[in-house]
Amino acid sequence: MGEVTAILSKSLFGDRLGINDAIDLLQSDAVEEIGAAADVVRRRWHPDGVVSFIVDRNINYTNVCVARCTFCNFYRKFGDAEAYILDNEAIFKKIDETVALGGTGILMQGGMHPQLRIEYYENLLRLIRSRFAIQLHCFSPPEIVVLAKLSRLTFKEALQRLKAAGLSSVPGGGAEILAERMRKEISPGKCTAAEWLQVMRDAHSIGLKTTATMMVGGGETVEERVEHLRKLRDLQNETGGFVAFIPWNVQLAGTEMAASIKETFPAREYLKLLAVARLFLDNFKNLQVSWLTQGLEVGRVGLRYGANDIGSVMIEENVISTAGAHYQATKDKLIEVIRSAGFIPAQRDATYSVFRNIA
């Protein structure tokens, strides 16, 4: 416990934690002490006591994917009977419904389709922009990698064209664990860690803000979790373009991965990871707790373990729900959770730059 106390004191005095510090904290059983330190750091970033959330919709425009992730039940191979690409009218209808519910943005992600080139995405963005005044938080780095390579463009060139067509910001999906051993094992057809980071670097260089995610519970080591956090912190040092970090635990019901991973990721372990992320990622202002994979009660507790954001109402979610995530929440429920934890709720946009205080 003495070693943990020294590490936490180091953080509270404003000194940057090292890799071994983070490993020691993640291996410690002092979860409450780590959480208390993370709460102090959270208050320094957010002294106003505001906890944010967003009303948006996750539109999965296609389920065709070449990644072959072992934790995914959603994807289909090209040519499968259940493979789809949503037509424009179906997408417009979903956006209409989102706007009617007070949504401010669209989180649009899909599989890595082996035939969709840059023109498809440009056309879709322009059509949406011509009809709706809504933020377009779209296309994770693995999607960008595939569409850029198919179109014989650099990642930066592809992002520049997408931005010109109406892209507002880039979601941090597809990061999983930014360690090559894990990526080759669980996502054999997905981009490398270096490619994921380069897409984010290029997005930041042209003024596109992005989020960063982390998937835990898929067989990674503690050292690999810290490697992931270190790579994010290093890139944030370089660019300052990440607006938030979002850790979530893998859902395994019916997946290929379930055969090798028998235990669910416990709430206590998740809360410890959340708190360590707040302490280690000292250049990230916003930290989101994943109620979608841990439940609303853990979401509430996580607001005292370093998180200042409780994520999305999730009007629609089709990927992790197919693997066992069935928690649901309305806007009113998220507001209730935030208030019950002693905070002031505020509705935000995807880049954490616009807030609507809740009466």
Image (spheres, rainbow, N blue to C red):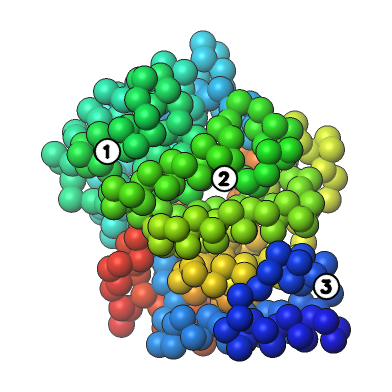
- The disc at residue 175 is 2
Q: Which residue is mark 3?
A: 28
Picture layout, residue 103 above or below residue 132: below
Circle 1: is it few (<14), some (14-19), or many (20+) Cα within 10 Å? some
At horizontal 25% and vertical 34% (from top left) the residue drawn is 161
Dot 2 or dot 1, earlier in sequence: 1
Q: Which mark is residue 160?
A: 1
CA–CA distance in space, label 3 to label 2: 25 Å
Label 2 element class:
loop
Give the image location of residue 144, x and y in percent.
42, 33
Q: Residue at x 34, y 37 (%)?
A: 156
Q: Between disc 3 and disc 1, whose residue precedes?
A: 3
Farthest residue, direction top: 79
Q: CA distance from mark 3 to mark 1?
A: 44 Å
Residue type, numbered disc 1:
Gln
Q: Which mark is residue 254?
A: none
Q: Residue at x 29, y 52 (%)?
A: 207
Location of residue 296 (image quadrant): bottom right
| Residue 304: image location, x then y, percent | 60, 80
Q: Nearer the viewer, residue 329 or 1?
A: 1
Q: Position of residue 340 (x, y in %)?
A: 53, 83
Residue type indicated by callout 3: Ser
Q: Earlier in the sequence, mark 3 or mark 2?
A: 3
Q: Nearer the viewer, mark 2 or mark 1?
A: 1
Q: Is residue 2 above or below residue 157?
A: below
